[in-house]
Amino acid sequence: MTERAAVAERPLAPTATRGTAVLALGLLRTARPRQWVKNVLVVAAPAAAGELFTAHALARLGLVFVLFTACASAVYLINDARDVTADRAHPVKRHRPVAAGQVPVTVAYTAGGVLAVLAPAAAVQLCSPLTAALLSAYVAMQLAYCVSLKHVLVVDLVVVTTGFLMRAMAGGLALGIPLSRWFLITTGFGALFMVSAKRYSEAVRMAGRGGETRALLTEYTTGYLRFVWQLAAGVSVLGYCLWALEDGGAPGQGLLPWRQLSMAAYILAVLRYAVFADRGTAGEPEDVVLHDRALAVIGLVWLAMYGLAVANW
C-alpha cells in the first residue's frame, strides 16, 4: 500500500508543472507575439533624425520597444478577459486562451493590469516623463477603444491610426529628438492608409456578413473606405515630397540628391501597396510586405536612399 501511495503521488508534481506551463503559454499567446513586430516603429523618429546607430540610442530604443510591447500586451489581455463571453460564441475567437479556459479571466485581468501600471512607471525611471505619458495615453486610448470607441464610426479608424503614430513617436520622445511636422504628417497618414486599406479589404471579403469580424464593418460602405485610403495615401505622399524638397538645394547634401530620389521609391511603394488595397487583399501590413517580393525590394531601396539622405552622403 505504501508503494502504491508513493506511485500515485509521483504524477502530481509533473501535472502541476504542466499546468503552470500551459498557463504561461496561454498568457504569452494572449499577449499576441505576432503583433509585437509593429512596435519596431519606435525606431522611426531616431532613424529619421539620423541618431539611430549609437550605443545609447540602441539601448534606449530596445527598452522602449519592451515597454511598448508590455503596454500592448496589457491591452490584449484585458480585452480578451472582457470579451470572453462573446469570444466563446465566435467560431474562431473561441480558441483564444481566455475563451478556451486555458487562462482564467481573473488571471488575464490581473496580468494586464500589472503590465499597464508597471510599464509607464518603469518609463518614468528609465526613459523620460514624456515617454511615460505617451505609454499611459496609449493604454487609456486602447482600453477606451475596447470598451466603446470601436463602435463609433470614423473614430475607430482614428484610434487605430493614432496607435501606430504613438509607436513612431515613442522613440523620439525617449531620446529627446524633436518630431518634425513632415514626419508626423507622413507617418500619421501613412498609417491611416494602411488601416483603412485593411478595413476596405475586410469589407470586400466579408460582404454581407461583415459583422462577424468587426462590429462596425457593416456600417461602412466600400466606397467610403476606398475614399479614406486614397485620401490618406495622397496626403502621406504629399507630406513626404514636401520633406524631400525642403532645402533641396542646400550645400552639403551629399554626392547625389538622395532626398529627392527617395521620393520615387516612396511613391512606388505606396502605388504597389495600393494594388493590394484595390484588390481587397491588404490584410496585416507586415504580411503584405513580406509576401510580396517586389514591394519588399522597393522598401529596401527606399530605406537605402532614405538612410543616405539622412547621413548626407
Image (cartoon, grey):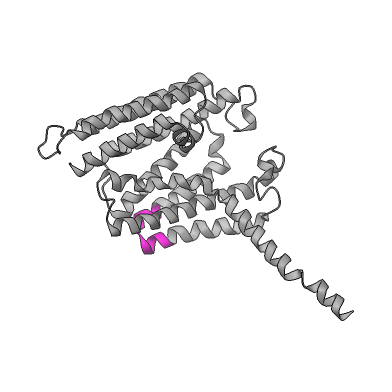
Task: Name the residue nearer the viewer: 48 or 212.
Answer: 48
Q: Is residue 9 visible?
A: yes
Magenta stretch contains residue 123: yes
**Residue 302 position within the rendered picture, expressed as x and y whole percent measured from the top left:** 31, 35
Is 86 rendered above or below residue 207? below
| Residue at the (45%, 44%) spot, across then down | 38
In the shown orientation, is residue 260 left or right of residue 45? left
Prevailing secondary structure of the magenta residues: helix
Quadrant that contains the C terminus: top left
Relative image position of residue 37 (x, y in whole percent): 46, 46
Q: Nearer the viewer, residue 21 or 159?
A: 21
Q: Is residue 181 visible?
A: no
The residue located at (58%, 58%) in the rendering is: 111
Specify the farthest residue to the right: 1
Q: Range of the magenta residues?
A: 122-133
Which quadrant of the view contains residue 18? bottom right
- Quadrant showing the N terminus: bottom right
Q: Is residue 2 magenta?
A: no
Residue reaching furthest left? Answer: 251
Q: Residue furthest top?
A: 223
Vertical side of 96 occupied by 285: above or below: above
Q: Position of residue 75 (x, y in %)?
A: 54, 49
Residue 123 image offset from top left, x and y in percent: 40, 59
Q: Is residue 121 above or below residue 273?
A: below
**Residue at 53%, 41% in the rendered image:** 145
Q: How many marks?
A: 0
What residue do we see at 60% from left, 32% from top? 215
